Image (spheres, rainbow, N blue to C red):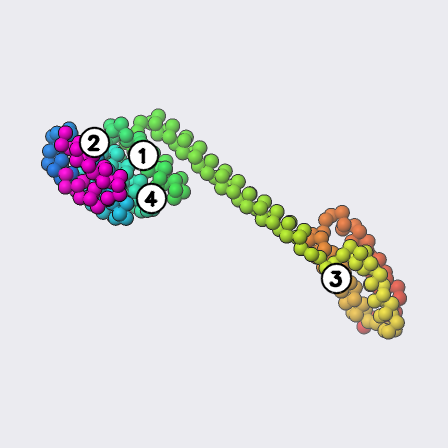
């Protein structure tokens, strides 16, 4: 009855966020309960005090004090109750201290006295779910499960199927996320291209051969003799200019426009060649 009253008092202090006072009560009476472990009430009280103390340490951001406190109360991690072990793993996983989580889990799970605990499988699952999976250590899970002597073959097989299902779901979710991002980027680029003003109009492209013919006539009029190398430069310049303005206008040349493009280029070359006289060099 005395432990019950103290536990209620400590719990009230925790609820009212008086964490240091709660911690002081837990530390004081947990030592007393530890000295009377032959009393079932003392064993239960030790667990409750440990849970409240762990939570108080967490609220005070003194999580590094949790493991020494629990180790002292139970004379070793392997002798802790499953509830206390799970809470320790969860706390250290919360601050991403995965090395300590691994140490706690391996010490407790590989102790022979814990093989027959009703919560043995729950501790295994907690470690996998909150420590191995967040680190994407999927390949380490089979060997870990196989090393858990408190699990029978059927339980191991069933749990591994569950793990592979989780892995498939995570990988599929990752693929879907990448595809969604790629689609979003493509949509953004398409909207940007559609909204971007173009300085090249369709009429400009349609009249492009006329501009080329004008240039050709001007060259023919002012340059009666032209070298083959100069003619090559003029032809290449015409082709490059048409490709550039076409691409700037449309964003990308569709296949249907290729035939029209090459027909126009051929006409351009004829326009360039017809009025000119050139000699080889």
Q: Quadrant of the N terminus?
A: top left
- The residue labelled by disc 4 is 94
Other-residue count near label 2 (Cα within 10 Å), few / some / many at <14 / 14–19 / ≥20? few
Query: How far across and how far down the image is residue 276, in percent?
Result: 87, 68
Mark 1 and mark 4 lie on one chain; the one further toward the N terminus is 4
Foreground pick, 198 / 212: 198
Residue 88, x across and y down, in percent: 27, 40
Question: In terms of image quadrants, where is residue 51?
Answer: top left
Residue at x-position 64% and y-position 49%? 190
Alpha carbon distance from label 2 to label 4: 28 Å
Quarter occupied by the C terminus: bottom right
Q: Main secondary structure of the magenta part?
A: helix
Residue situated furthest front in the rendering:
16
Dots 4, 3 in contact, CB < 8 A:
no
Query: Mark 2 vs mark 1: which is more N-terminal?
Result: 2
**CB-based contact (under 8 Å), mark 1 and mark 4:** no
- 2 or 4: mark nearer the eye: 4
Q: From the top left corner, tell me how far across and down residue 265 is, in percent.
A: 80, 57
Residue designated by label 2: 113
Question: How many residues crowd around disc 4 within 10 Å: few (fewer than 14), some, or many (20 or more)?
Answer: few
Residue at point 33% right, 36% down?
A: 126
**Disc 3 on helix, strand or loop?**
helix
- Left or right: residue 16 versus residue 212 is left
Which residue is at a point 38% across and 44% down the rendered structure image?
135
What span is colored magenta in the figure?
1-29
Q: CA distance from mark 4 to mark 3?
A: 61 Å
Q: Which residue is mark 3?
A: 241
Mark 4 or 3, nearer chain start: 4
């Amino acid at each position: 009855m005395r432990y019950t009253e103290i536990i209620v008092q400590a719990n009230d202090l925790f609820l009212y966020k008086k964490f240091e006072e709660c911690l002081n009560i837990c530390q004081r009476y947990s030592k007393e309960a530890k000295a009377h472990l032959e009393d079932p009430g003392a064993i239960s009280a030790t667990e409750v005090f440990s849970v409240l103390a762990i939570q108080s340490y967490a609220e005070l951001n003194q999580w590094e004090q949790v493991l020494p406190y629990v180790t002292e109360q139970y004379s070793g991690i392997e002798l802790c109750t499953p509830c206390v072990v799970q809470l320790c793993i969860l706390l250290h996983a919360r601050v991403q201290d995965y090395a300590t989580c691994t140490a706690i889990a391996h010490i407790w799970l590989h102790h022979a006295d814990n093989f027959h605990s009703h919560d043995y499988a729950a501790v295994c699952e907690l470690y996998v779910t909150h420590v191995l999976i967040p680190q994407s250590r999927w390949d380490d899970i089979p060997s870990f499960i196989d090393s858990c002597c408190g699990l029978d073959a059927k339980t191991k097989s069933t749990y591994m199927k569950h793990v592979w299902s989780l892995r498939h779901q995570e990988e599929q979710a990752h693929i879907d996320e990448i595809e969604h991002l790629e689609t979003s980027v493509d949509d953004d680029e398409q909207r940007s291209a559609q909204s971007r003003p173009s300085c090249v109009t369709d009429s400009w492209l349609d009249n492009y051969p006329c501009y080329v013919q004008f240039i050709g006539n001007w060259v023919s009029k002012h340059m009666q003799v032209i070298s083959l190398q100069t003619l090559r430069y003029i032809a290449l310049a015409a082709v490059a200019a048409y490709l550039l303005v076409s691409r700037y206008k449309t964003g990308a040349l569709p296949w249907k426009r290729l035939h029209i493009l090459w027909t126009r280029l051929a006409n351009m070359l004829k326009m360039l060649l017809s009025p000119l006289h050139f000699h080889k060099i």
